[in-house]
């Protein structure tokens, strides 16, 4: 009888231990799932913050590029007596297309041999429309019509004050998809006065984060 009671008691004890172990395992699994969910939420928040920090850094880098170009334009103006035209001269011959012309004129003026931006601004070039001149222009080793790029690898539009009334065709690349985006770029006016920004100078315009000219995130060389 004593042995029987011990056996029954032992089975109950083992059963209790098994149930407790199962419960502990069940709670452990729930805890692991909860931790996974929490980590996923934290990772999503971190990625959002990192993405915002990256966008801010790229915006700051583009503003720095605009300042560098402005400095080179001032140096060019002191030597040449004026800022570069944003429309091509007859000395270049026929242009391959009418896309990104102002940006290409900026490159040709500043990045030629002994130009104000040679060795500095020509470290970051892009040729979104992949065009080139028939003949190699003076002061260059290649005939490619490059553009100075912003932090998103899109051309920075350039418009001389004599061309403020013109419409320029620009091609950019959308950062999310890499798709080509076409836009008409025009010089900007002060919304309060109705007058051109920088009426005796020029305007530099970056398409900004979205890669599209004419949207709210555009960056300018002047205070909008």
Image (cartoon, rainbow, N blue to C red):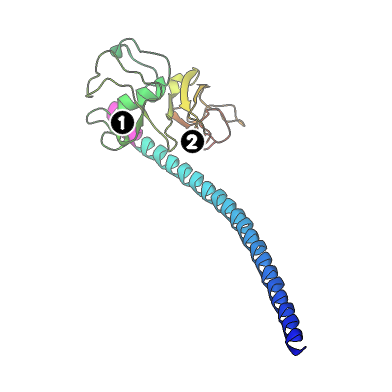
Q: How many marks?
A: 2
- Residue 95 in the image, given as x and y percentages of width and height: 35, 13
Classified by dominant secondary structure, the portion drawn in magenta counts as helix
Residue furthest to the bottom: 2
> Which disc is residue 222 wearing?
2
Q: Residue at x 33, y 30 (%)?
A: 77
Q: Is residue 64 left or right of residue 214?
A: left
* Residue 14 drawn above or below residue 135: below
Q: Is residue 6 left or right of residue 66?
A: right
Instruction: Give the residues drawn in magenta, as a range.
Output: 72-83
User: Is tag 1's residue or tag 2's residue first in the polypeptide sequence?
Assistant: 1
Residue 6's place in the image compared with 73, above or below, is below
Q: Is residue 2 visible?
A: yes
- Find numbered disc 1 in the image and state the secondary structure of the residue it sits on: helix
- Residue 125, which numbered label? none
Q: Quadrant of the N terminus?
A: bottom right
Do residues under tags 1 and 2 come within 8 Å of each other at their CB atoms? no
> Where is mark 1, residue-wise?
76
**Closer to us: 39 or 71:** 39
Of 132 and 41, nearer the camera is 41
**Quarter residue 133 falls in:** top left
**Horizontal and vertical percent position of residue 109:** 31, 26
């Amino acid at each position: 009888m004593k042995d029987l009671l011990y056996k029954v008691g032992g089975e109950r004890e083992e059963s209790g231990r098994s149930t407790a172990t199962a419960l502990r395992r069940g709670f452990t699994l729930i805890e692991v799932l909860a931790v996974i969910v929490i980590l996923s939420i934290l990772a999503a928040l971190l990625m959002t913050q990192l993405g915002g920090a990256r966008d801010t850094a790229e915006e700051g880098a583009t503003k720095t590029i605009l300042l560098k170009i402005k400095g080179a334009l001032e140096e060019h103006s002191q030597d040449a007596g004026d800022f570069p035209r944003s429309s091509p001269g007859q000395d270049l011959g026929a242009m391959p297309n009418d896309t990104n012309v102002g940006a290409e004129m900026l490159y040709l003026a500043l990045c030629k041999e002994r130009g104000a931006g040679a060795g500095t601004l020509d470290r970051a070039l892009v040729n979104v429309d992949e065009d080139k001149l028939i003949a190699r222009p003076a002061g260059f080793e290649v005939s490619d019509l490059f553009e100075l790029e912003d932090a998103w690898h899109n051309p920075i539009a350039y418009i001389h004050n004599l061309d403020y009334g013109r419409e320029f065709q620009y091609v950019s690349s959308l950062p999310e998809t890499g798709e080509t985006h076409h836009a008409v770029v025009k010089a900007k006016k002060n919304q309060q006065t109705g007058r051109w920004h920088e009426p005796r100078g020029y305007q530099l315009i970056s398409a900004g984060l979205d890669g599209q000219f004419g949207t709210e995130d555009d960056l300018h060389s002047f205070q909008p």
